[in-house]
Image (spheres, rainbow, N blue to C red):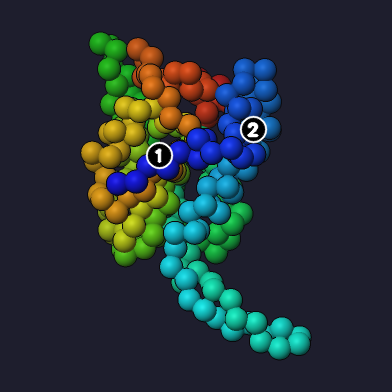
């Protein structure tokens, strides 16, 4: 299974990562959402290089222009609510793609542990399709695995791209051990640590709250 960390490359991408992390910038909700969207666009472009293409002849006003075009649009999936602005970046590029939405929330126990509860999934059939499963944060990996297991009720994809803005190494390892070999993990940054409440350190905080306001 391949893991690709875009943040290791020198590009404009790192400006957007720095801004969603920066405590002096990230509280501008509109800018936070827009930066997530921008990075979704960059990931969409990079992932598009891995797809299969066929040559098509395009009729112009002056003749015929041959060009290689994607054989099929992927299915785009995200976890509500934090993933919505990130997903929009993918939609800006894959503008004919079908979409899936999954709920996944932490249910905290009195002993400090938590489980993941998923009550909602809306998805097209994904049998033999390319699935892009995007979520801003990959902490423990439990939510991502729960989302994937929910998606399997709609079929088995031919290939999977798990895409996150910031991951913990623990989350990366958990996905690697719970997803099939036809999965590629894309990350904007990989942090080493998790807090005692399983938040990524240094991370950025709660992506959903930063995008849409603090939940109660």
Side of 209 relative to 65 (left or right): left
Side of 76 relative to 58 (left or right): left
Question: Vertical placement of 23 versus 176: above or below?
Answer: above
First-in-chain label (1 vs 2): 2
Q: Residue at x 25, y 11 (%)?
A: 111
Instruction: Judge the density around disc 2: few (<14), some (14-19), many (≥20) Cα neighbours within 10 Å.
Output: few
Q: Residue at x 25, y 49 (%)?
A: 180
Picture coordinates of residue 3, whole percent (x, y) = 37, 42
Q: In this rendered view, identify the residue nearer to me: 179 or 9.
A: 9
Picture coordinates of residue 188, whole percent (x, y) = 50, 36
Q: Residue at x 35, y 12 (%)?
A: 196
Res 54 seen here: yes
Side of 148 relative to 37 (left or right): left
Q: Point out which mark residue 103 bears.
A: 1
Q: In this rendered view, identify the residue nearer to me: 115 or 16.
A: 16
What residue would you read off at disc 2?
Answer: 15
Query: Which of pointers 1 and 2 indicates the residue nearer the eye?
Result: 2
Side of 52 relative to 119 (left or right): right
In which quarter of the view is residue 197 placed? top left
Q: Point out which mark residue 79 bears.
A: none
Number of numbered markers: 2
């Amino acid at each position: 299974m391949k893991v690709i960390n875009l943040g290791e490359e020198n590009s404009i991408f790192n400006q957007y990562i720095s801004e969603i992390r920066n405590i002096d910038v990230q509280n501008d909700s509109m800018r936070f959402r827009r930066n997530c969207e921008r990075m979704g666009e960059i990931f969409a472009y990079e992932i598009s290089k891995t797809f299969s293409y066929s040559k098509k002849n395009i009729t112009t006003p002056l003749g015929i222009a041959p060009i290689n075009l994607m054989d099929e649009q992927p299915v785009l999936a995200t976890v509500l609510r934090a993933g919505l602005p990130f997903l929009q970046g993918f939609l800006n590029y894959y503008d004919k793609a079908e979409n899936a939405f999954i709920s996944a929330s932490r249910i905290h126990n009195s002993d400090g542990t938590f489980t993941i509860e998923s009550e909602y999934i809306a998805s097209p059939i994904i049998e033999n399709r390319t699935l892009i499963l995007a979520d801003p944060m990959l902490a423990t990996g439990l939510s991502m695995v729960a989302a994937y297991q929910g998606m399997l009720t709609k079929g088995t994809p031919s290939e999977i791209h798990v895409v996150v803005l910031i991951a913990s190494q623990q989350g990366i390892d958990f996905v690697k051990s719970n997803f099939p070999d036809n999965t590629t993990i894309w990350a904007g940054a990989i942090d080493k640590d998790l807090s005692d409440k399983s938040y990524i350190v240094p991370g950025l905080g709660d992506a959903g709250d930063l995008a849409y306001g603090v939940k109660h």
